[in-house]
Amino acid sequence: MKGLAQAGMEPRDHSVPARIRPRIDEVESSLIREVASRGMDSDDVLALWFGEGNVPTPKFIVDAAKRALDQGHVFYTDNQGITPLRQALAGYISGLYGVPMDIERISVTASGMSAITVAMQLLVEPGDNVVITGPVWPNCIETVRIAGADPRVVQIELGEDGWSLDLDRLFDSVDENTRAFFINSPNNPTGWVMPEEQQREVLDFCRGRGIWLIADEVYDRLVYQGRHAPSFHTLADPDDPVIIVNSFSKSWSMTGWRMGWMVTPARLGLTIGKLIEYNFSCVATFIQHAGIVAVEEGEPFVAELVERYRRGRDVVYQRLAGIDRVRMALPEAAFYAFFAVDGMADSTDFAIRLLEEKRVGLAPGAAFGPGGEGHLRLCFAATEATLSESLGRIAEFIER
Amino acid sequence: MKGLAQAGMEPRDHSVPARIRPRIDEVESSLIREVASRGMDSDDVLALWFGEGNVPTPKFIVDAAKRALDQGHVFYTDNQGITPLRQALAGYISGLYGVPMDIERISVTASGMSAITVAMQLLVEPGDNVVITGPVWPNCIETVRIAGADPRVVQIELGEDGWSLDLDRLFDSVDENTRAFFINSPNNPTGWVMPEEQQREVLDFCRGRGIWLIADEVYDRLVYQGRHAPSFHTLADPDDPVIIVNSFSKSWSMTGWRMGWMVTPARLGLTIGKLIEYNFSCVATFIQHAGIVAVEEGEPFVAELVERYRRGRDVVYQRLAGIDRVRMALPEAAFYAFFAVDGMADSTDFAIRLLEEKRVGLAPGAAFGPGGEGHLRLCFAATEATLSESLGRIAEFIER
């Protein structure tokens, strides 16, 4: 060994290949990116494939970050976030949902995604499974796989009255290895919102069976009736086995800032703090300061954003409803039209051809798990001009 | 179940406790924080416990972030980072180490810590082990545990000529379940630097045995001789089983910005991109823009920083060397004095008493794994006045 080492430059024929975790090869890349990569860099594509609004972060939040930079907020912070931000979030949550909220329950994370990663590290390992309502954005499924556990997807279904979940099927899919439900409501991609009565039953099932509930409520503010969607915040006791994940990305147009938060029972605070230390240690300090301003002064912006997205939704719904082969429900929340195209067997192939022939970029339904095939997702957080032009081309392509 | 659910508010006596992953209870919190939590909020404590300089981020980097915010760089980016930053890093690495560097090999992460987390997710699962040189900052050990694998620490030892590693012991600790070495050089806490001859032998062992090398080179620029420490960059071929982790935190005083990077074989790029997508998706966009300026214009700052830390090192070394019960090596790199105190059986207890009686905050050696007991760590990235006053008190405490 030593001789070889000293020579340094000999041929490598005798080397043994170093392998990566076999399971990581099973982690899928996003089919959304697979389609988008064919046209992301082309200026002539009307791109409605990603889950991102077209409204930049408002100036009052940008200014707060710049102020924090000038004030020298550039050093490490507590793992769970700076106290003023956790206090601001506690005030925001209790004001919005009318519930008490202890800052010990709140941890600031490097995005909603990062909160989900921490939750998976906390709860699951090989041999465990997580029951997930689908169709759902692919990341929730893959993060379970990265943790070494098995995702089990129970489909919501599109009927006459829109999307709905059969709770018996959800509960029947639980076995002795189920550690958690993952419920994303309001849902990406369908806009489905779990009704409060169902939330109550799910919560009670979790209490009775010792199963965790991970509630991804990232779209809680992007709703087209009321100020917020039904939330587990209004139902769960502070000690319930519930982890609620949220993000600054959608409500305050801060996708590129990478900050979210999670609410857990207070008894888990120290453990969450440890996991944050060993994942990313803390969120950038000046971004945390901007977060305070977002939650404390952001209500007029959120209201304006929802009105803008509502106009987009209405334009898209009207136009799509007029195409014979299309079926969809009016989205109650989020900023997606998730529509079925009768006779479309392969949504990825369809999306690629739509891109190539009509220069419109949509996400294939197959990206959102097995129940998503047969659908396409269009993000309507775009200008009316872009939406109108895109819909004309989509109609042509489907109807020809 | 349904009856219970509808009532909603019944007593919870029949609930089943939901458990977290048993293994997570074994993940230790940092003993540094355990000591520091007793005095972090007191203004009268001379705090030298954390691994963070006292120099704020230089203005030219802050200004770049503010400019990027004004220019609207607030949307999602590619998982592996924006191309201009990856190009800037490739230029920086090839300029510094005199090696070619392909941007396909570079992924931008949400801190050096986050790069290590991604590396562990990529390489290890339950049943595997990682061989780590110690004493070492606790996070590397715990991140292996979170991935479900076993950390095995091989100690470097303090002799007449400073710290050194017995390579035979390192190689003997490898078994058929060893997936990776984790080598932190320049080392936190000891300042040890692995000599290039040893790096060559380790690399060759990895090639021959199909074992990955995770090289944590976060302190590569904080060296007191030359422009950089010996680096695996100068030895490894692009396809070698080597992952080199680095960070903006130490070289450019950007701890609170949370950005690092990892260099891997190009063939892993897509897989790393997937893992980043499912961990934190990308680093904050305007922070990435500031990173470009840091690596392209930061050399005068780095040189000045090293000179400042060198003065701190010399003050601390002289004073500590004058205390009878103290043994230490002159640190070759990083910004820590890691010194043995003869007769000190419990470094945590000692650090707590030093804090309580003398208001000086040090990190207990026990925080850095079993080989760290009997030592204390002092971060000398502080003003000379603070260092001088602290050392007077430490000497009094040890000598009384």
Image (spheres, coloured by chain):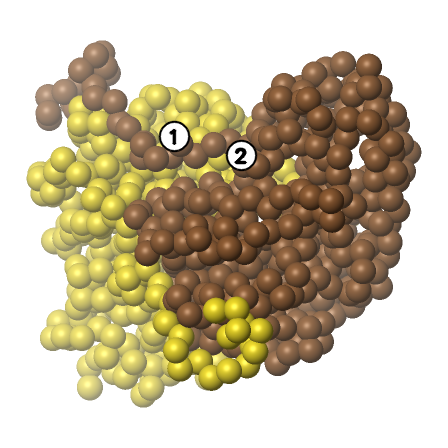
Chain colours: A yellow, B brown
Are there few (<14), some (14-19), or many (20+) residues within 10 Å of tag 1?
few
| Image coordinates for residue A358, horizontal then vertical, percent | 34, 85
Helix, strand or loop at mark 1: helix
Residue occupying the point 79% across, 40% down: B380
Three-letter code, disc 1: Asp
Q: How many marks?
A: 2
Task: Give me the disc on residue A10.
Answer: none
Q: Quadrant of residue B294?
A: bottom right
Which mark lies nearer to you, 2 or 1?
Answer: 2
Q: Amino acid at mark 2?
A: Pro
- The reply to the same-chain question for discs 2 and 1 is yes
Q: Measure how far apart labels 2 and 1 are at the Cα level.
A: 19 Å
Which residue occupies 31% across, 35% down?
B21
Residue B272: x and y in percent read: 43, 64
Query: Is there CB contact under 8 Å for labels 2 and 1?
Result: no
**Residue at 56% across / 77% down in the picture?**
A8
Query: In the visual, does B249 lie left or right of B181?
Result: right
Identify residue for label 2.
B370
Label 2 secondary element = helix
Mark earlier in primary sequence (2, 1): 1
Per the image, the residue denoted by label 1 is B25
- Tell me the chain of label 1: B
Which part of the image, by quadrant, shows the C terminus of chain A?
A: bottom left
